[in-house]
Amino acid sequence: MGSVGSFAGEPGQISRLTQVSTDGVIVTVPANEASWDDLRAVFGTRGDPARCQCQWFKSDRQWRSVPVSERAQRLRQQTACGQPGAAETSGLVAYLGGEPVGWCAVEPRTAYQRLLSARVPWTGRSEDRADESVWAVTCFVSRAGFRRCGVSRALAAATPAFARARGAQAIEGYPMIVQPGQEITWNELYRGSRSIFARAGFTEVSRPTPRRVVMRIDF
């Protein structure tokens, strides 16, 4: 499925990226430019995304004790949905044919408490864990009914410009290596696949496990 990216908006303002695929035009916007209802539609009411509310990496070890309603409230505050003038937001929302179809979490690496103590990002690397100029892509959600439409690919393609426009000096992700015919569950693939990061211009900088890689772009 081929795609072509182009930026839309006023000169000097990087806010939207369109990806043209065989399934139609996918438009990605900063989450604060999307409505909270749209983001709720992406996460749905059942399944892992609805339970997590993208709070796993944002929370400390007490994550399981936080009610889903509180997780949702935290996500709403972090994204600043419906506030296009907000100074900060925590990710991107994708639209296909005007329908909200996907979410991607991307923020400074230091924003993810659990990531700072995880093994994968740091194994075999000399990195300053307190470096706020390095951003991280931690999670993808494709809305039920819109999977295999290129949603994650479009979101991954939009992350470098999104981060760079907000002062990032580098951006990285921690995707899965997916082999042909291999069964992958959402519990694994929410991190993204190596192929979608490669298509977005990320290059592999380390392989801490047989199935996980660190992919990165330095600006």
Image (cartoon, rainbow, N blue to C red):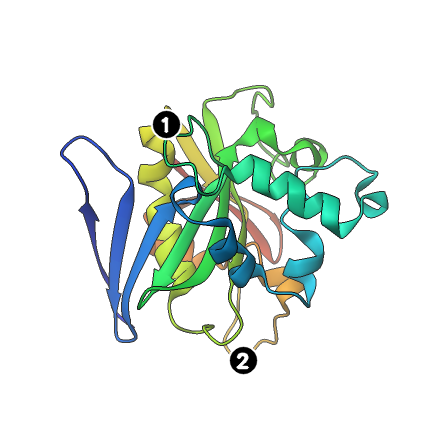
The label shown at residue 181 is 2
x, y percent for residue 113: 68, 32
Q: Earlier in the sequence, mark 1 or mark 2?
A: 1
The amino acid type found where label 1 is placed reads Arg
| Figure quadrant of residue 66 | top right
The label shown at residue 166 is 1
* Closest to the observer, 60 or 197: 60
Q: Residue at x 53, y 66 (%)?
A: 178
Q: Mark 1, mark 2: which one is toward the viewer?
A: 1
Tell me the element at label 1: loop
x, y percent for residue 142: 50, 64
x, y percent for residue 219: 32, 29
| Figure quadrant of residue 129 | top right
Q: Residue at x 29, y 40 (%)?
A: 15
In this rendering, the answer to whether 122 lies above or below 81 is above
Q: Residues within 10 Å of mark 1 (few under 14, many from 20)?
A: some
| Figure quadrant of residue 170 | top left
Q: Is residue 176 visible?
A: no
Tell me the element at label 2: loop
